[in-house]
């Protein structure tokens, strides 16, 4: 999948994204479109450029991943999810979105 980078904590990464003005969280619509920074995108217009994984040492529910995503017009945002059965996205199409997105490592 995408470039994997482990960082100390989820909070650290979110703070870094905010400092870089990349703290735009995506939302998946019921029609399979993605809402990012006030605009709707199709899946084909988005690419995963980096991932950040967090593995809970004592609690599997703490396992999370951030997908850093860039649109074709340069908007950068992120999607946040937990692993496996602990997912935050059971029926909104987020998992399918991630599977279908092209991985293009980038800045």
Image (spheres, rainbow, N blue to C red):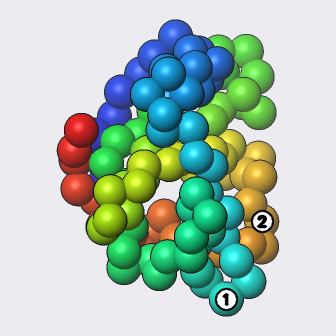
Find out whether the residues at labels 1 and 2 contact each other: C-beta distance under 8 Å: no
**For the residue carrying disc 2, how many other residues have a C-alpha within 10 Å: few (<14), some (14-19), or many (20+)?**
few
Q: Is residue 54 visible?
A: no
Q: In this view, does 59 lie to the left or right of 57?
A: right
Between residues 1 and 30, which one lies in front from this camera angle? 30
Count of number-bearing discs: 2
Tell which circle, 1 or 2, labels the residue nearer the N-terminal end. Answer: 1
Q: Please tell me which residue is depicted at 46% across the width and 16% down the height of the picture.
A: 7
Is 92 left, or right, of 52 in this rendering?
A: right
Q: Residue furthest top?
A: 8
Q: Is residue 95 left or right of residue 27?
A: left
Which residue is the extreme one toward the front? 38
Q: Position of residue 21 (x, y in %)?
A: 49, 34
Residue 58, image quadrant:
top right
Q: Residue 45 bears which disc, if any?
A: none
| Helix, strand or loop for disc 1 | loop
| As drawn, 58 above or below 35 | above
Residue placed under numbered mark 1 in the picture: 31
Looking at the picture, tell me which residue is in the foreground, 86 or 106. 106
From mark 1 to mark 2, how far is it between C-alphas? 15 Å
Residue in front for this viewpoint, 80 or 26: 26
> Farthest residue toward the bottom?
31
Identified at 74% across, 60% down, the residue is 89
Residue 24: % across, % down: 58, 46
Residue, disc 2: 90
Say which quarter of the image contains residue 34.
Answer: bottom right
In the picture, the quarter occupied by the C terminus is: top left
What residue do we see at 73% from left, 52% from top?
A: 87
Q: Is residue 86 above or below residue 42?
A: above
């Amino acid at each position: 999948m995408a470039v994997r980078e482990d960082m100390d904590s989820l909070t650290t990464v979110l703070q870094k994204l905010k400092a870089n003005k990349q703290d735009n969280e995506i939302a998946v619509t019921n029609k399979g479109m993605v809402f990012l920074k006030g605009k709707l995108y199709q899946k084909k217009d988005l690419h995963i450029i980096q991932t950040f994984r967090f593995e809970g040492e004592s609690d599997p529910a703490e396992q999370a991943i951030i997908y850093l995503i860039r649109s074709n017009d340069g908007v950068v945002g992120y999607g946040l999810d937990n692993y496996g059965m602990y997912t935050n996205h059971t029926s909104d199409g987020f998992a399918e979105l991630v599977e279908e997105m092209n991985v293009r490592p980038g800045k």
